[in-house]
Image (cartoon, rainbow, N blue to C red):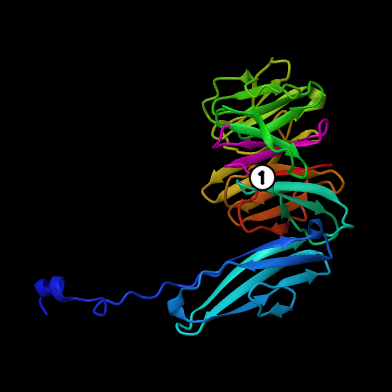
Amino acid sequence: MGLGSCFVSCTDDDFPVPAASTVPKFTYTIDNDEFAPATVTFTNTSIVPQAVGEPTYYWNFGNGDSSTEVSPSYTYLEAGAYEVKLVVTTSASLEVREEIITLVVKDPNAVGTPIYFTNGNQLFQGLINDQAPIFTPLADVAPQAAYEIVYNASDEKLYISDLDAGKIYRCNTDGSDFEDFRSGLSDPIGMAIDYDADKLYWTTGSGIQSTDLGSTDVNDREDFVTGQTNDPEGVAIHAPSGKLFWGNYSGGIWSKNLDGSNETLVIPDIETGSMSVIGDRIYYDEYVGSGDIRIKSAALDGTNITTIATGIGRVVYGIGFDASENKMYWGDRDTDALMRANLDGSETELYYQASSDTRGIVIIN
């Protein structure tokens, strides 16, 4: 058959189109406000083309129990994070496809120190205690590209910076009342609260701005630091000395009195993305080279620098502090790991293995 005759006489049988593939999918709802014991109702929304034959379904509920119903319900008696798997097998094409999700059933009696982090478009909440960590997403919180979270004890709300949206949001600690707090901002990332003055500070692409926390005007802001050409990112406040510290992505660590005086370069010639002040020391990450990020600590005047952690693959955003255990927490965004260590760097360990980015860690002490 010549090429010309193909345009005239070729049929679908000459070039058969393979049957569309099966796509396993499901949704679920959890009763009892997601606290154990909780019944989970699974709704099978799998796409199964007619050409692949009759499907059979196999559910693994993540605790050894299973079902072959199309859309089963299952009661979890104990709290935990369960990896639920739906396997779809078809009779004609012999396809085997699976979908896996992790659902969390909460412990109604759990107590501990609240901890939050973000992967950029969701916020996750957990408790620090003697149990294995379980994090659940805050359902009503929907940022575009969140980087930092701070907690304001005065109004008991979380504040979230969103780089892409140019906004700072706020919400209750359970995610309710999610709203714009400030909008029209230039590259907001790091945030810090001055409790004495009831002010929120945040970094911009070229400096630092602030606003009164009591103001409801989404456009209310004022410049505090200007002319920083090296992309300020992390910011923290040391209340006893009345100083604000910030780190430039490629321009060192700086400080300035909260009254607006004495802008000072504290540690020159480093690249940093995150900043926290714990006690009388600055904790920050330093970009040493590609794939070589280190967390360090220094005195408030920039002296007595020590290394806390090494081997971090990407720039850190958010260093949290648990006062009850005297430990610091940070996210390794290269491995999606939430890490923790003593303040001197000892007992460094994996605290929680997430499935996506870990940044903006905040702990409510």
Which residue occupies the foreground of this view, 50 or 146?
50
Left or right, 13 with reference to 141: left
Q: Is residue 54 above or below residue 293?
A: below
Residues in magenta, as a range: 140-166
* Magenta stretch encompasses residue 156: yes
User: Would you place residue 82 above or below residue 206 in this image?
Assistant: below
Q: Residue 8 appears in which quarter of the rendering?
A: bottom left
| Residue 274 or residue 83, whichever sits in front | 83
User: Residue 234, can we see it?
Assistant: no
Quick one: 296 or 71, which is closer to the camera? 71
Q: Nearer the viewer, residue 189 or 236?
A: 189
Q: Which residue extends farthest front?
A: 50
Residue 25 x, y percent position in the rendering: 57, 67
17 on left or right of 289: left
User: What quarter of the picture does the C terminus occupy?
Assistant: top right
Return the residue at label 1: 295
Q: What residue is drawn where x is 58% and y is 24%?
A: 207
Q: Quadrant of residue 155?
A: top right
Which residue shows up at 84% across the image and 43% down it?
Answer: 323
Q: Position of residue 106 (x, y in %)?
A: 80, 59
**How far across and down, in percent of the image, does residue 245 sit?**
69, 28
Res. 13 in view: yes
Magenta stretch: residue 249 in it?
no
Please name the amino acid that badge 1 sits on.
Answer: Ile
Residue 171, position as x, y percentages in the image: 73, 38
